[in-house]
Image: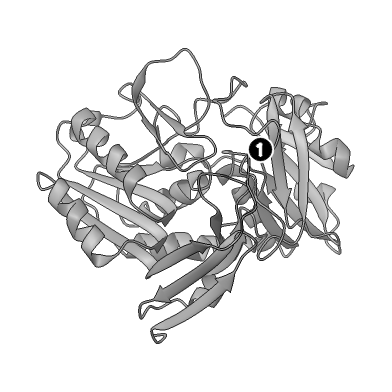
Amino acid sequence: MHNQNQCGVTLQTGRLEVEVEPSTHSIENLLEFASRENPKRAYLFVSKVLGKYIPCKPSTMRNSYRELAKLIHPKTPTLVLGIAETATGLGAGVAQSFCQQHKDIYFSQTTRFKKDRPLAFDITEKHSHAPQHLIYDFNKNIPSDTIRDVVLVDDEISTGNTLTQITQEVIAYLPNVERVHWLSLVNWMSHLRCKEIKTQHSNIDLHFASLLKGEFNFKKTSNQVIEFPRATATELSRAHCRWDLGRTGVCINETSKVTFINTQKERLTLAHLDSSSSYVVVGTGEFNYQPFLFAEIMEQAGFDVLFESTGRSPILKGGGISSKLSFFDACHQANYYLYNLPEERTPIILYETLEQLEGSPLHKLLNCRAYYLEDF
């Protein structure tokens, strides 16, 4: 166990004071810190094990999935819900880990893709650059009346306001839920706040579990006025997306096929890669889990590979963000970003659909290979 510790971090936007409780994981192993380019919230906890903004080994990500899954013991049938966009891959990975011990594990996610499909519910994440989350109806793909446990997966919980909204809606939507678990890499809620939330949901058995528990305080020290950058992706995307990966519910084992093809319909195989080169596989937006699986296959075959993903969140350089590539994605009609790209590695960018590949300039900017997920 690591001893309880405190640390202070000076960011461009203010001073962050962090206090961590005794834990099996140290803050140094899990987190970096950065400043958001966001007037609603000026700080950011940047995970070292998530594979989003900091490239990391697929095996490190897999270990975090397994360690999180070990923290709770849901009774099946279970629904795992990943919170977009950062925790979509994390949620799917946790769901897959549950399958090692349990049957009837289903996965869904919140999304910021807007389509003419029925919704289960939607919520507003007030501090986010993109506040609206959509949760599409999944009754056709999941036996909703059998679900007993719901696991809400997020990379980090600060106030609990977002997951409180989702919990209330989930209880109303799923008639026979008995337990709800909030599962996260890091939980910053005070013990008093956790107690308040449990009291608010006294009609349900509510649990919190995380790899790291602590509290923080942020004090703004700069008079600099932070505004969203031009063309920030604040609105829902109208881009073409897939519906067989979790947005309308899926049995998690049905999402593990990872055949990627290019615009000439040529498949991406390990035989096409140079085993003496080092690579970084790049997922795109909410599309993280299948690109991670391909990177994991590469690592298991002996390749030197890291994984990270593009995102819509604007972050200032500094702290845990050493480099920043901004590009206008015509498919989403907004700016997207790629942070901390290792210059010495060869990128392979993996998209969800052909339309998203053709609409993004990123692979052209980096002069690298680009593929999209073949239909199952």
Q: Position of residue 251 (x, y in %)?
A: 39, 36
- Residue at numbered disc 1: 259
- Quadrant assignment for the C terminus: top right
- Which residue reaches farthest top? 116
| Residue in front for this viewpoint, 71 or 127 | 127
Task: Left or right? Give the position of 106 relative to 116.
Answer: left
- Which residue reaches farthest right? 367
Q: Looking at the image, which residue is at 54% across and 25% down? A: 236
| Residue in front for this viewpoint, 110 or 255 | 110
The scheme the figure's colours follow is one colour
Q: Looking at the image, which residue is at 33% across and 50% down? A: 160
Q: Looking at the image, which residue is at 62% across and 21% down? A: 239
- Against 49, residue 17 (above or below) is below
Q: Residues within 10 Å of mark 1 (few under 14, many from 20)?
A: some
- Quadrant assignment for the N terminus: bottom left
| The quadrant where residue 299 appears | bottom right
Q: Position of residue 38 (x, y in %)?
A: 58, 45
Q: Position of residue 149 (x, y in %)?
A: 23, 45
What element does badge 1 sit on?
Answer: loop
Q: Position of residue 114 (x, y in %)?
A: 51, 20
Task: Left or right? Give the position of 262 relative to 283.
Answer: right
Q: Is residue 73 visible?
A: no
Q: Is residue 86 visible?
A: yes
- Which residue reaches farthest front? 223
Q: Looking at the image, which residue is at 33% across and 46% down? A: 161
Q: Amino acid at mark 1?
A: Thr
- Against 98, residue 259 (above or below) is above
